[in-house]
Image (cartoon, rainbow, N blue to C red):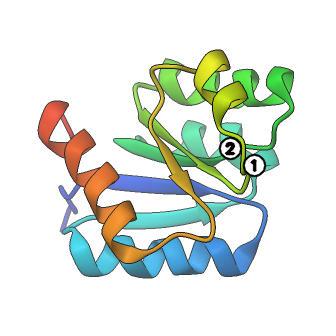
């Protein structure tokens, strides 16, 4: 039986953060969720279509741009996870990409992802 629920990929190098994001998303949304490290993003995108990629923001503009481009080229919406206190650089470099701050809370994650689901063709 084919699973037609939207798929979300969490590309995060810190497994406990990825698992917490997975828990929040699985409780709030009817979706499938997969986790990978950032350096495995291209492989994961080649194997499956994802409606949304929750991508760890590293602060390395070249790497972040590369991973963002790969996700968008695959047709996914992207939201950044960031631990950075000063979001000015992030907003300046990637103004159209929504952001979730780490450590995060359930309400923020569900709000940001919920808005993406309502405003885009999700799934």
**Residue 112: % across, % down:** 33, 50
Q: Which residue is mark 2?
A: 41
Residue at 50% in and 54% down: 9
**Residue 69: % across, % down:** 61, 20
Q: Nearer the viewer, residue 81 or 46?
A: 81
Q: Nearer the viewer, residue 39 or 112?
A: 112
Q: Is residue 74 left or right of residue 65?
A: left
Residue at 22% in and 68% down: 29
Specify the quadrant that holds the C terminus.
top left
Q: Is residue 35 left or right of residue 24?
A: right
Report the label total. 2
Q: Nearer the viewer, residue 36 or 59?
A: 59
Labels 1 and 2 touching (C-beta < 8 A): yes
In this view, which residue lies farthest toward the left?
A: 118
Residue at 72% in and 41% down: 86
Specify the quadrant that holds the N terminus.
bottom left
The image quadrant that residue 57 belongs to is top right
Residue 30's place in the image compared with 123, above or below, is below
Residue 49's place in the image compared with 72, above or below, is below
**Label 1 to label 2: alpha-carbon separation:** 5 Å
Q: Which residue is mark 1?
A: 38
**Element class at badge 1:** helix
**Element class at badge 2:** helix
Residue at 72% in and 26% down: 89
**Residue 4: % across, % down:** 18, 55
Q: Is residue 118 left or right of residue 41?
A: left
Query: Badge 2 local density, few (<14 within 10 Å), some, or many (20+)?
Result: many
Residue 96's place in the image compared with 41, above or below, is above
Query: Badge 1 local density, few (<14 within 10 Å), some, or many (20+)?
Result: many
**Residue 66: % across, % down:** 74, 23
The image quadrant that residue 59 belongs to is top right
Residue 50 can be seen in this image: no
């Amino acid at each position: 039986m084919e699973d037609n629920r939207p798929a979300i990929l969490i590309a995060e190098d810190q497994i406990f953060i990825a698992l917490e994001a997975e828990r929040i998303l699985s409780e709030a949304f009817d979706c499938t969720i997969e986790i990978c490290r950032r350096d495995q993003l291209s492989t994961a995108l080649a194997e499956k279509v994802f409606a949304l990629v929750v991508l760890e923001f590293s602060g390395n503009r070249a790497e972040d741009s590369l991973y963002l481009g790969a996700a968008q080229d695959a047709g996914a919406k992207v939201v950044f996870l960031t631990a950075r206190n000063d979001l000015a650089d992030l907003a300046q470099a990637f103004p159209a990409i929504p952001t979730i701050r780490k450590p995060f809370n359930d309400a923020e994650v569900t709000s940001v992802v919920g808005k993406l689901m309502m405003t885009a063709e999700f799934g």
